[in-house]
Amino acid sequence: MKVKGVLEEKRITLPELKEELLSLEAKRRDERRELSYELRRSIEHATRLSRTSAESSRKLVDELLKLEKMKPDIAYRIANIMPKTRDELRAIYAKERFTLTGEELDEILGIVAAYL
């Protein structure tokens, strides 16, 4: 498959990607077309790593973006990984120029726990 150009670029969470891939799979099966190896592996990967539904992952990102020290990249990363401990959350923030206090970490973990 050759890609000639990017038509649109938008951020989505892993569960949203899973839904998109599953709809593409259903469409191809309806057309009786064979699924490519890459598509099968992508669906398997997204299914294995998704921990929540697409709707709740979108709500999680929206809620995380309301926090003070939250960037869109980090909010999507948190929604994809769904960290359960402070150490996992600190690893996500490792490249940032600021550090979070224990209360801020606990607040983020509390939000994530509500969507698990």
Image (tube, rainbow, N blue to C red):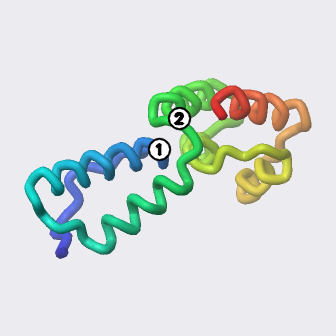
Q: Where is residue 72 shown, x and y percent of the image?
A: 55, 41
Q: Is residue 35 above or below residue 64?
A: below
Q: Are marks 2 and 1 in contact (CB under 8 Å)?
A: yes
Instruction: Name the kind of residue labelled 2 in the image.
Output: Ser
Q: Where is residue 23 shown, x and y percent of the image?
A: 26, 46
Check disc 1 and report its element: helix, strand or loop: helix
Residue in view at x 33 percent, y 71 percent? 38
Check disc 2 and report its element: helix, strand or loop: helix
> Which residue occupies the extreme left position in the image?
31
Of residue 65 and residue 116, the one placed in the foreground of this image is: 116
What's the CA distance linking mark 2 and mark 1?
A: 7 Å
11 on left or right of 110: left
Q: Where is residue 103 shown, x and y percent of the image?
A: 88, 30
Q: Is residue 50 above or below residue 6?
A: above
Residue linked to disc 2 = 57
Q: To which quarter of the image does residue 68 belong?
A: top right
Q: To which quarter of the image does residue 102 belong?
A: top right
Q: Which mark is residue 15?
A: 1
Task: Give the class, few, some or many, for how many residues have Cα within 10 Å of label 1's Cα (few <14, many ≥20).
Answer: many
Nearest to N terminus: mark 2 or mark 1? 1
